[in-house]
Amino acid sequence: MVFSSTIFLFVFLPLVLVIYYQPWLRSRTFRNRFLLAASLLFYAWGEPIFVFLMIVSIIAGWFVGLRVGETPGRTQQMRRHWLIAGASFHVGLLFVFKYLTFAAHEAGLLLHADFSAIHIALPIGISFFTFQLLSYLFDIYYDKAQAQRSVLNVGLYIALFPQLIAGPIVRYDDIEQQIEHRHETLHDFADGMMRFIYGLGKKVLIADYMAMIADDIFSMGVPLSIATAWLGAAAYTLQIYFDFSGYSDMAIGLGKMFGFHFPENFNYPYVSRSIAEFWRRWHMSLGSWFRDYVYIPLGGNRVTRWRWIWNLFVVWGLTGIWHGANWTYLLWGLLFFILILFEKVTRLPERFGVFSHVYAILALVLSFALFRSPDVPFARRYIGMMFGHHSAGFFDFAAQYFLAAGAAVWLMAIVLSLPIVPYLQRRFGAHMAGRIGEPILAAGIFLLSIIVTLSSNYHPFIYFNF
C-alpha cells in the first residue's frame, strides 16, 4: 500500500484514525496493539507472503534481545555471542533475499555455470526493518536501552506503518519511551497532518513529474545531446530528492498524528558546499546508523591514517551495496568514498567559496547518473554523453522540449530544494496571514495532489526497492 494511493488516503488511514481515537477504548495497550495489527495489515496488503518473514524476524529479534540484555548470571562474553548470533541471522536473511540472486548470477558468469534458477523476490523495505532490528540489538548490547519484555512492543517498533517501508531508520533508543509513554496532542496531530500533505505534494506534484522526464531520457536508447543527458541526470537528482524526502515527510507527519516523534531525515542537502556536508543533510538516519554502528566501532578517525582510510572505504562500500545488489550501487558508494577522502585530505571545498556549491552539485548530478543506470556499461555510455563522448551535439530538440514542457515544475523543484519555505515560516508564521494562509495552502496542495493522483499512472516510491 502506497501513501499516495487513494486506498490509503480515503480508506485505510481514515479507518485507522477513527478506531485509534475512538473514545471508548483509550488505553495505551489497546492503541499499541491496534497500531501493530493495522501495520501488519498495511505490509501484508502488498506483501501477503513476506509479512510472515517480517514476523519471524521480529520474534527472533525479541528473543535474542532478551538474551543480549544484561541479566544476573549472564557474562559479557555470553551477551556478545548472542549479539553476534542475532546480527548474523538478520544480516543472513538480508543477504539471501536481497543479494543471493545477484551473487549467483555473478558466480555463474565467473564459473561459466547456469545459476538462473536462483531467483528470489525482494521483500519491500527489508533493508529498513533489518537495520532497525540490528539497531535494537546494538542499543541493548551497548546499554543504551532495555530489552523489551513484550514481543508485541518490539513488533510495533519494527512494523509501525508510517516508517516501515522506506524509513527514516528509527533507532530503538529514540523510540523506546514513546512506545508506552507517548502523548497524543491536537497540536501534534495538526502539525503531522500538514507535514503529511507537504510530503504528498512533493511526491505527486514534483517527484512523479521529474520521474517521467528522467525515465524518458534514460530510456531513449539513442545518442543524446550533452544538454539532454545533463537534463536527464538533473531530473533524476530532483526526482530522488523529492520522492524520498516526500516519503520521509509523510512518515514523520503520520508518526506525529499517532504521537510518535521520528528523527528528521533530510535538511536541504542540495545547498551543501561539499559531499561530506551533503551526507550530513541527506538520508541522515542512514548516515548516522553507519557512523554509530560501523564507523565508530571500527575506530573512526582515532586510528592510523591507513586504518582510517580503510574505515571510510568499508562504510562507503556498505552504504553503496545497502541500496541494492548491483555493481552501480557499489561504485556509487565508492565514488563518495573517493570524493570525501579527497575533501578531507585537501580541504579544497573550504577554499572554493561560492564555487564549492557548484562543485558539490555537479558531483551529485554525476553520481545520480551512475545510481540511475541499470548497469555499468550503460552508466559509462550515459556519463560519456554528458561530456560529449558519442553525443548528438550540444543541444537538440529533446532538450528544448523537456525544458519548455515542464518549465514550471523545474522552477518549483529548484526553489523548493532550497530552504526558502522555512525562512518564510519563520518570517510570517507568527503573523495572522501566516496562520491563516498555511492551512489554505495545505488544502490546495492536497486537492491538487488528489486530482493528479486520480489522473496519473502509478509511480512507486524509489526507496521501496531498497
Image (cartoon, rainbow, N blue to C red):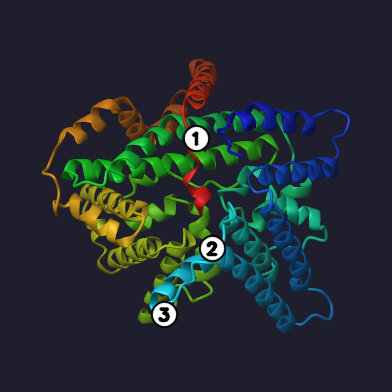
Image x and y of residue 194, in percent: 57, 28
> Distance of mark 3 from mark 1, alpha carbons?
40 Å
The crowding category of the residue bearing disc 1, from other C-alpha atoms within 10 Å (few below 14, some 14 to 19, many at least 20), is: few
Where is 320 relative to 426, above or below?
below
Label 2: state its secondary structure.
Answer: loop
Q: Quick one: label 2 or label 3, which is nearer the N terminus?
A: 3
Asked if one can make out residue 132 in the rendered structure from this viewpoint, the answer is yes
Q: Quadrant of residue 149?
A: bottom right
Q: Callout 1, which amino acid?
A: Tyr
> Distance of mark 2 from mark 3, alpha carbons?
18 Å
Disc ID at residue 458: 1
Name which residue lies at 28% across and 66% down.
Answer: 342
Residue nearer the viewer, 48 or 125: 48
Label 1: state its secondary structure.
Answer: loop
Q: Contact (CB < 8 A) between labels 3 and 1?
A: no
> Distance of mark 2 from mark 1, alpha carbons?
25 Å
Q: Quick one: label 2 or label 1, which is nearer the N terminus?
A: 2
Asked if one can make out residue 430 in the rendered structure from this viewpoint, the answer is no
- Write down the residue under mark 2: 119
Q: Contact (CB < 8 A) between labels 2 and 1?
A: no
Name which residue lies at 29% across and 57% down.
Answer: 379
Image x and y of residue 309, in percent: 37, 75
- Write down the residue under mark 3: 111
